[in-house]
Structure formats: C-alpha cells, structure tokens
Image: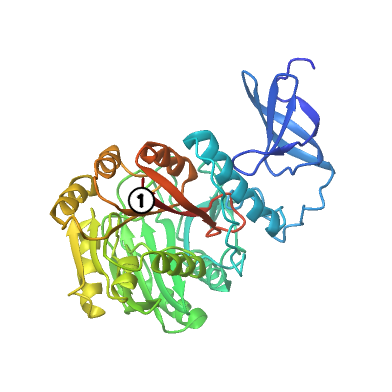
Amino acid sequence: MEKIKQDDVLLLHIDGYGMEGEGVTHADEYVIFVPFALPHEEVRAKVTFVKKNLVFCDLVEVVKPSPLRVKPECNRFPRCGGCDLLHMAYSEQLAVKKENIQNLLRKNACIDVVVDDTVPCSHPFGYRNKIQLPFGTVNGKTAVGFFKENSHKIVSISKCFLHGDWAEKLMRVFLTYAEKFSIKAFDESTKQGTLRHLVARCIENRYCIVVVTNACPLPHTETLLALLQESIGEDFSLYYSPKTEYNNVILGKTVVPVRERPFAINVLGVDVLLNPYSFLQLNDEIRDKIYTRVADTVSSGIVIDAYAGVGILGATLAQKGLLVKNIEIVPEATADGDELARRNHLSDRITNYNGDAAVLLPQLLQDLPPEEKISILLDPPRKGISAEVVNALLSLDRPVHLVYISCNPATLTRDLKLLSPAYSVDSVTPYDMFPQTKHVETLICLKRK
C-alpha cells in the first residue's frame, strides 16, 4: 500500500472494534480507525490525521452494511457528539462493552477473569434524568444543544432521544423565552451574551431547573415562570447561577432561587432531598440495580464508603442494620449526608467524615477492632483512586472485602493492577448506565489474598 496521507479517501473492510466502539482495520503497517463503522462492513473513509502507523478517519459512506447496523431516528447523529453507538444494534452495544472491559483487564492489569454479560437497561432510550445543555447562536438565533465532539461548536437540537419528552418541553420553553425577549447566548470569543447553560433534572415529573448566566441575574423571570407552568405544571424549582469564570465547570459558585420547591426522591427506600449541586447517577434503573447488587454482596460487618457523596449507597446498607462510615471531601455533601441520615432515622448507624479518603481511610481502618469484618466501597470520580488510597489498601494486614464501582475502564484497570499484589478479583460486572454511548459502569468485587 502507498503511504497514507491526510485527505485520502480509502476503501476499507472493517475487521473489529477499537476501545471506544469505533471500527478498526489494518493495512500493511497501518492501524486505521473509523468511527461509526462496524465489523465486516465495507466503507469509504476520509483520512483526517496520520500519526506514524495510526490513521484516523471520518466515515464517508457505508458500501456494504453489517446486519448489526440500525438506522438512527435522530437527525443530529453523529454530528452532535452526544451518542457514539446509536448506529449499532443494542445487543451488540452490550457485547462490545463487555469485550472492551475484558480486553482492558488483560492489557492494562494483566488480569484474566471471566467478565459477566453487560447488565442491560430495559429502556435504552429516554433513560437520562438530567440535561446539561450549552446555549449558543445558530443562524443568528439563540439555540440550545450539544457541543460537537472535541470542540465548542454548538449543534442545535430540539429533541434528544436519550432523554424523555420532559427535556424537549424545557428546550422549547427556553427557546421561546429567548426569542420573545431577544436574549442572547454567551459567546466565548467576545465574552458577551446572557445564557450559558441549561441544567435540569427530572424525576417522577418533578423538575429542578438551573439557568447558568454570564455573571448576571436572569431577566424576565415572571414570563419564564408562566411559560414553564404552562408546559410542565407546578412541580418545579427554578434557579439561576451567575458564572464569572471562563472554564469547563458548568455551574457557578452559587445558585439563586427564583421559584423553590423541595425536590425529594426515594432511592431503594432511602428518602433523599436533592439540591442543584447534588450528585445523582443519571440512570435511575441501572443505579438501583448496582446498589441492589452491592447490598446483596455486603451482608455484614462495618462498611467504609471512601467516596460517599451524600451517602445514598451507605444509607441503603444501613437500612439492613450495617454500621456505615462515609468519607467525603466536599463539605456541603457531608452536611447533606448528615441530614440524609437524620431524615431516614439512621444517625445511629451512619457516621459521616469530611476529608480526603487518602488521609481518613487509613485512620478509620487503624481504629477498627482487628476481628471486625470490613467492607470498603470505592466509587471514585473518573480519575480513579489516588496513590495514597492504593497504599492504604495494600498496607492492610486483615481480611477485607472491596467493592469498586467505576465509570472509567482505563483508570479502573490501572487501579486493579496496582492492587493486584494484595487483592484478587472475584467478579466483574459491566452495567449499561449509558446506552447508545461508549461509556459503561463496572462493578468489581475483590478480596484480600
């Protein structure tokens, strides 16, 4: 084969998948990646970038489609960057996620273990309970949508198939509101414009809505409230969050209530009062399946949740009679955790500690009786667990049960390799928290060797 150059159009037969669900093939010394292509397809692809023997392409045409290819209903796919696998049959999405976890365990962690089938989501569309949509300008009008992948160029949308109809209603209200009063979207280049992001959560037809503004109050709120009431009813809160910083953090440092209502939900019997800054998994069904599995796995002893948030998972275990010690680095979340324990009459079984798990975890472990059965829950952010937490876990000289919940297979497998001298993997179960995307949630149970 001749040397491959940028802008070449290649006729390719796809061999398999890459780690992000893209199509992959090989030609001489080249490894060629084609997003949105499937194995056994013949495609035309345009080269966008060449780095040594790695070639990255855009899909131009599917010449011979795979029987696993489906026609997406969404007319913004794949331009908006929100979905990666919308072209793929759902059964194949589940299989790909399982295979990727299996391959990463072998490649990154040198662990050869049977990976369970990916636990499916019974509703692979309309499952998200939260939106975070940037405002932008399209054809001179204020629009709302998603950023095109690897850019801050907005792709306007009026509907998203990953959310229920509730999101479509909100988008329509805010576009009507912006047009009625000629309210401009924030422009990153000029730093002008009012509207930056629309952030909202909807659970059981109750709404918590936050409009992120460019360091200013939200204008014409009476009309906006009337439009919202007409569209979604009375059960909603509305806030604005003035943001002065120019970074990738979406919410500002404060939220100002325009119309405030309690946002209470029930998670597996635990009453939870949410606020605009509360973290909650965006797929209620899969969250409950994971928490139920953890509750079945951790049946006795003392539980330490090293990345507890407001402590919902720990509360589900405390309801079973277990003693739970929650560690959380964000002070507001720890305070919310105390309130959650009181609200659910679990203060005698739950103790919340504010601080870094790297510091507090070793201290808590040192203070526990040596004969006590210990389970440690690890549900860290995407960056995984710190070296200090790894060292604390490796230095233990007592039996301990680890449960690791991860949304990032790369950092998960890195951490498992670091832990492997002292811990063996009992089970690995992927959960499809994010259907139609390349992302996957994974639950791993480990025990001290």
Observer-nearest residue: 257 or 430?
Answer: 430
Q: Is residue 154 left or right of residue 359?
A: right
Q: Is residue 96 left or right of residue 420?
A: right
Residue at the far left: name it.
367
Observer-nearest residue: 441 or 401?
Answer: 401
Q: Is there any visible trace of residue 379 in the rendered image? A: yes
Q: Quadrant of residue 273?
A: bottom left
The residue depicted at 77 percent of the width and 37 percent of the height is: 14
The quadrant of the rendering that contains the C terminus is top left
Q: Is residue 319 above or below residue 183?
A: below
| Number of other residues with Cα within 10 Å of mark 1, as a class: few under 14, some 14 to 19, many 20 or more | many
Residue at the far right: name it.
64
Q: Is residue 422 above or below residue 308?
A: above
Mark 1 lies on residue = 380
The residue depicted at 42 percent of the width and 45 percent of the height is: 424
What amino acid type should be assigned to the residue bearing mark 1?
A: Pro
SS for dot 1: loop
Observer-nearest residue: 25 or 218?
Answer: 25
Q: Is there any visible trace of residue 135 in the rendered image? A: no
Tell me residue 420's x, y (percent).
40, 39
Q: Is residue 54 left or right of residue 320?
A: right
Tell me residue 421's x, y (percent).
37, 37
Tell me residue 422's x, y (percent).
34, 41
Observer-nearest residue: 280 or 323?
Answer: 323
Tell me residue 202's x, y (percent).
46, 72
The residue depicted at 63 percent of the width and 55 percent of the height is: 94
Q: Quadrant of residue 291?
A: bottom left
Q: Is residue 102 above or below residue 280?
A: above
The quadrant of the rendering that contains the N terminus is top right
